[in-house]
């Protein structure tokens, strides 16, 4: 009796966990397929009018505008080839428009003193760039709540929170980040992670949970038959 009740709890739990990992694997594979299909071909011009994030996601885009380094931010805790550093995010004002687009220019190393931020060189004047538009996640793991926007611009950020960015600036912005192409100017180290990164890990976890469910059923049947 008790074995049957325990089995009734374990098997649905194991199957549920397996399906959760399976869905995470499928979601990453779908995002990678979307990137592969939408990012190829000639880049399209970034629209000056507000656009939906879903319409821009993974598009290969072309930008023409002026960087505004006074609103530049550094994303902390970014690792490149096992070295700690920052991602450099600089807003670009599109020529002939008030619309801004946040450009991820790549990775720079952190110095020996974390309190001293690296010096970032930003070209002046109008510049043409190409890259892939990505939509940052909306959920982040943070050790402390973000600071409220104040009079002094906060340079160091933990995550690319687009809603927080929108509340912190006085101008319109597109709801995407543009990851610079490897050959684009004004960038730093760029080895962007793939959407399907570690997808096989979730697939493996799913098989493990399904295996636990099958093993639990097999053990229960074995003792049931043995007792009879």
Image (cartoon, grey):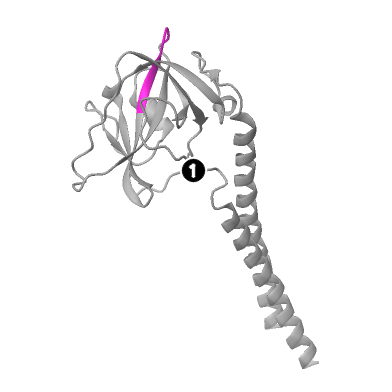
Residue hosting label 1: 193
Residue 23: horizontal and vertical position, in percent? Answer: 64, 51
Q: Is residue 183 above or below residue 81?
A: above
Seen as rendered, the residue at the extreme front is 183
- Residue at 23% x, 37% y is 118
- Residue at 19% x, 43% y is 115
Q: Judge from the rendering whether residue 227 lies leftward or rightward of residue 109; answer left or right.
A: right
Q: Is residue 190 above or below residue 94?
A: below
Q: How many marks?
A: 1
Residue 81: horizontal and vertical position, in percent? Answer: 38, 49
Circle 1 residues within 10 Å: few <14, some 14–19, many ≥20: few
Camera-side residue of 59 and 50: 59
Q: Does the image show residue 144? A: no
Q: Quadrant of the N terminus?
A: bottom right
- Residue at 29% x, 16% y is 124
Q: Is residue 122 above or below residue 65?
A: below
Q: Main secondary structure of the magenta part?
A: strand
- Residue at 65% x, 71% y is 212
Examine the image and state in which quarter residue 76 appears: top left
Camera-side residue of 143 and 95: 95
| Residue bounds of the magenta highlight | 90-97
Residue 18: horizontal and vertical position, in percent? Answer: 64, 61
């Amino acid at each position: 009796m008790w074995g049957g009740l325990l089995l009734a709890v374990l098997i649905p739990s194991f199957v549920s966990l397996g399906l959760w990992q399976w869905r995470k694997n499928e979601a990453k594979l779908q995002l990678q397929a979307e990137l592969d299909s939408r990012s190829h071909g000639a880049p399209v011009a970034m629209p000056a009018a507000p656009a939906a994030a879903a319409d821009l996601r993974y598009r290969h885009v072309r930008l023409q505008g002026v960087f505004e380094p006074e609103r530049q931010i550094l994303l902390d805790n970014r690792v490149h080839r096992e070295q700690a550093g920052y991602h450099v995010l600089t807003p670009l004002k599109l020529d002939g428009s008030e619309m801004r687009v946040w450009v991820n220019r790549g990775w720079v190393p952190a110095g020996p003193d974390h309190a001293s931020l690296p010096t970032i060189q930003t070209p002046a004047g109008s510049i043409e760039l190409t890259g892939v538009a990505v939509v940052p996640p909306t959920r982040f793991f943070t050790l402390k709540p973000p600071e409220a926007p104040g009079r002094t611009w906060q340079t160091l950020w933990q995550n690319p929170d687009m809603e927080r960015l929108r509340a912190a600036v006085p101008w319109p912005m597109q709801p995407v980040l543009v990851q610079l192409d490897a050959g684009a100017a004004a960038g730093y180290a760029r080895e962007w992670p793939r959407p399907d990164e570690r997808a096989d890990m979730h697939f493996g976890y799913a098989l493990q949970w399904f295996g636990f469910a099958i093993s639990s059923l097999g053990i229960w049947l074995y003792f049931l038959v043995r007792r009879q």
